[in-house]
Structure formats: structure tokens, C-alpha cells
């Protein structure tokens, strides 16, 4: 069973079906509920959104991955953000348009140009907007195209997006276990909590950059106590099974509190950017050399 | 005229009145509209939320400060987040509770304990929720206490918050001009855009930490093109008029694109953390020494 942030007809369902084509699926009302279905064993994995190219990180996912027991990402997928405007079969005027605030933000210009008089109504998800249109509460919903089938609505217009390149990245997370094999185009994610001291974050990032490791994302989330206390979410190119990535993650672990959030293939299959100054084979060679010196062989 | 992110009765109005007690105030429908009222001269300053200790950065403010002409922060204030539940004078049952999603998130536990059956309805602002309750659309609104007076509602309960220490920081921004004087407890803000290269961010942060400059905030916002392209928002302790802060900001400017977003007194009056290894007087002495050496005096 694969839990996902539902209800039916969201982009997250579309992402989950793309990641596990022959799965059985369990919609969950919130991101926390989807993650907890994995924690308590009702689902073997959960699909949740983690990052959007326009709105940034999905806070509920970052918080949900760190505020209870450990879950690790084992796969990801990236979907282009293209919305449909759905209406009832017999629709005429569109005076109200409902959707999740993130979705409304991503078609702001399109709505201003094409439906300038329509009132915009925030809902808890794009699918909740489709349901409300089905019930006759609002005239139109901005949703994933898949929602038209689930809720028997008509596509007034499809494929709309203010920014042609907008996309959302989704994770498939499981309870800790055997990690996916390295593929040469992987991503490793972790959460670090440092002391509030001058240079603490610079030192963490320098541990990575000195080893030629490129970040793909760095987000600071409040630790939810005082303003100025943060958790840092770091995504880097590479797999923790690689010697240089493992060496770097261990170095971070010596300096601060670290939670490992997964190593898995990148959805875009992009290999690591550039040749690192010190590669995996150099780490292996240096370790072997050190051991031989310590054994008194001094080669 | 001071523009603020309205409508009337929001925490932002409360913050604006605290910053400019004798001001005239202009509510604006969005954060963008409040900022643009300053840009086009209708207001001399705008008050906008920038950071919340639970939800993190206010994306619309960060984007709004960087996606048009330059505005600079000249003051800040921090308000504790304590909500009231407002109802109509004749209210009995509470079956629906409306508020902005950020406000609902911050009283999630309180609602689960005290109004577990009530449906939660997202609105575009806390004050919009109060207006909807006034019109009879919903039974209760989660808002700032000030809204009870504006909308003739009754406080069902006040002073509620899941986290006792939750707070929001607000900025007062103006068009560029004379900067506030340094006070010894200041904050400097800027936005940096680096090339996507291994170590680029580590180098920027090291420029600051080598000069003993402490960060109070670092946020990455998508540049809204491809996933993986970011703008970094950096807040640091100190004032750009100080030699060591100026030296650091100029060093960043040599490495990447930088937009200065203001130097102003900290609302918490906290002095810089710790004694920097190299202080302002050392910067002045070193500059004077270099000039004398170049003049051939070699002192």
C-alpha cells in the first residue's frame, strides 16, 4: 500500500502512480497523515511533495520528516506544473475560482488576463476545489487534469501555467532499511541542527565544498522555538555509499546533530556537476595508505 | 502615509501602529500592493511581515523586495503571536472556523482540543475571516484581538497559541535614502545570487565568518526558473556603516550579484553575539597603515 497526500485527483496521486505504476494507493488528508501511515505500518511507502520551483520548499514535508521517527527517501519524481480549469458540464459564467493558494499563485497572471472578474477562493487542496465545484459551491477549480475524471467535471481549459518551466519534486519515503543502489546520478538528503555560533553554517558547507560536493538545495526551517533558531535541510549530489559522500556526512556528524533523510537516484538523471578535485578512488587510496603506514609499512 | 498589508484588523496593522504611533495608514490588499504604494510614491513607507518563528519566511515579502525596484528596511518590530477566536454577538454553536492557513497552523492543537468537530476554512487573511463571520458565512474567526473592534465581533476566547514563544517579525521599508544611524544592536539584510558552482555558497558565508560576522537568518528562495536555482536572503548582525560589515558586503559584491535590503536597529536590542576576532578599529587601523606604506612611510 502506497500512501499519498490526497484526496484523489491531486498532482501527488499522479506522482505516486508514476513512481509505483502497479501499486495500491491510500489517500491521506494531510502530509503528516501520509507519513504516519508509513510509520505505523499501514503503508509500506508514502509519496509527498518536497519542493516547487516557484513556491519553494513544502514546509509540512520538511517538518514531517524531522518531527517524529526517521523515514528515508528512496526515490523521487519531478512533474511539470500545468493546471486545468475545471467546470461543471452545464457551466456558463465563471464568477468564482477555487484552488489551493499555491496553485492560485502559479496561475495568477493567467487568471488576471482571462478571468479578471472572478473571485479567487482558497481551499485546502486542488482536489477539494474540484469537489466544491462538483457540489455547486464555486464555478471553477484550478487543478491537475486527472481530477476531471475523478469528479466528473469538464475541462474548460488545460495546460495553463504562468511559468512554462515550473515543476514540483515529489519523494517516495519508507522506514529505514536497505538503501537504493548508487547509479552515478544520485541525491543525498539530510537535516542538520547547528549551535547558533558565528561561522557554524560556513564550516558545515566548507566540509562539503572542500570535498568537491555540490549542493542542490539548502533550506532553513525554524526550529519552532525562538526566531533565529533553525534546522538546515541539505540536498547534495552523490550517494552515501560513495566514500567521499560518506566521509563528508561523517564530518558533519562530528560537528553537529544530523538526521539522514535518504540517498536515491535523481529524477533528472543529471550526473554530478564537474569532476571533484578529490574523487572516490582518492579516498580509498588514502585510507589504504594510512592503514599501511600505521601498520609500519610506510609505503 | 504608511501602507500595510491589510485589511484592517491584522497583526500587520498592529505592527505598523507600533512602529509609527502617529501615522496615517493605508491598508493594501496584498504585500506586493503595499510595497508598490511606496514605489509609486502614494506612501512614504510600508509595513510588511518578513518572518514567523513557526512558519518561516514570508515568501511574498522576500519576492516583493527583489522583483522590482529597490526598497530598504529602516526599522523592524517583533509581535508575539497570540490569537483570539471571534464570534458574532449572538453566537451559539461553532461548526466552522475560518482563518489564514498560517494562523490555523499556529492554533492547530488548540482547535483539535477545544473545537474538534469544527470544519476549518482557509481565507486570504485573518481579517477576511472576521469579515466573513460578520457576514454570517462562518461561525468563528481566528484573528488578532484588534479585529474584534473593527468588525463588531465578540471574543469567544483570547490569547491562544500552541507555542508560547511564537512571534512574527515585521519590517518598515522605504525608498532608498539616508540610512538609520548605527545603534550597536543592528541588523543588515541583503539578497545574493551566486552561480551554481560547488562551494559558491560556502565561500560567501566564509567571507562573513572570517570577519566574525554572525548570521541571524539565511533563506533560499527559488529564482522561479528551474528547480535548483536560488536567491539567498542573508540577515547579519551589524550595520553597513561599520567598517567590518562594509568590508564584508563589498567582498560579497566582488563574488556575486548583491542587492542591499537595509541596515536598521534590532527590535530585540540584542548586541552582536561575542567579540569579533577583528573589530572595526582593526579595520580602520589596517587601512591607515596600508595607505601610509603606499605613501612610502612604512611605519
Image: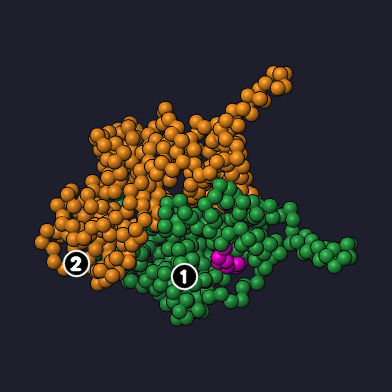
Chain colours: A orange, B green
Q: In the picture provided, is B236 more to the left or to the right than B295?
A: left
Q: Position of residue A141 (x, y in %)?
A: 23, 59
Q: Chain of mark 2?
A: A
- The residue beneath circle 2 is A94
**Is residue A226 visible to the viewer in this orientation of the structure?**
no
Residue located at (36% from left, 46% from top)? A78
Q: Position of residue A175 (x, y in %)?
A: 39, 32
- Residue stretch rendered in magenta on the structure: B258-267
Q: Chain of mark 1?
A: B
Question: Residue B241's quadrant in the figure?
Answer: bottom right
Q: Position of residue B264 (x, y in %)?
A: 60, 68
Q: Nearer the viewer, residue B191 or B90?
A: B191
Q: Secondary structure at mark 1?
A: loop
Residue with the most extreme left position: A90
> On screen, B65 above or below A232?
below
- The residue beneath circle 1 is B68
Q: Give the main secondary structure of the magenta stretch.
A: strand
Q: Position of residue A170 (x, y in %)?
A: 36, 44
Q: Nearer the viewer, residue B241 or A185?
A: A185
Amino acid at each position: 500500500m502506497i500512501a499519498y497526500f490526497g484526496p484523489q485527483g491531486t498532482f501527488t496521486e499522479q506522482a505516486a502512480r508514476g513512481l509505483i505504476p502497479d501499486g495500491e494507493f491510500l489517500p491521506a488528508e494531510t502530509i503528516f497523515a501520509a507519513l504516519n501511515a508509513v510509520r505505523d505500518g499501514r503503508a509500506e511507502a508514502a509519496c509527498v511533495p518536497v519542493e516547487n520551483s516557484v513556491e519553494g520548499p513544502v514546509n509540512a514535508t520538511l517538518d514531517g520528516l524531522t518531527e517524529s521517527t526517521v523515514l528515508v527517501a528512496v526515490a523521487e519524481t519531478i512533474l511539470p506544473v500545468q493546471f486545468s480549469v475545471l467546470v461543471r458540464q452545464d457551466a456558463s459564467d465563471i464568477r468564482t475560482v477555487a484552488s489551493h493558494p499555491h496553485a492560485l499563485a502559479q496561475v495568477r497572471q493567467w487568471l488576471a488576463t482571462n478571468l479578471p472578474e472572478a473571485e479567487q477562493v482558497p481551499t485546502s487542496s486542488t482536489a477539494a476545489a474540484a469537489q466544491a465545484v462538483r457540489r455547486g459551491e464555486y464555478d471553477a477549480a484550478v487543478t491537475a487534469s486527472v481530477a476531471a475524471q475523478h469528479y466528473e467535471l469538464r475541462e474548460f481549459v488545460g495546460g495553463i501555467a504562468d511559468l512554462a518551466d515550473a515543476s514540483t519534486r515529489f519523494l517516495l519515503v519508507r522506514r529505514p532499511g536497505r538503501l537504493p543502489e548508487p547509479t552515478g546520478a544520485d541525491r543525498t538528503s539530510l537535516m542538520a541542527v547547528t549551535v547558533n555560533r558565528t561561522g557554524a553554517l560556513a564550516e558545515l558547507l566548507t566540509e562539503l565544498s572542500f570535498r568537491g560536493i555540490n549542493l542542490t538545495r539548502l533550506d532553513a526551517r525554524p526550529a519552532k522555538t525562538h526566531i533565529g533558531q533553525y534546522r538546515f535541510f541539505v540536498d547534495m549530489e552523490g550517494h552515501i555509499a560513495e566514500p567521499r559522500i560518506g566521509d563528508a556526512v561523517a564530518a558533519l556528524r562530528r560537528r553537529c546533530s544530523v538526521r539522514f533523510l535518504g540517498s536515491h537516484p535523481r529524477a533528472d538523471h543529471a550526473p554530478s556537476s564537474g569532476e571533484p578535485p578529490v574523487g572516490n578512488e582518492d579516498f580509498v587510496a588514502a585510507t589504504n595508505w594510512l592503514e599501511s603506514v600505521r601498520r609500519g609499512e610506510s609505503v
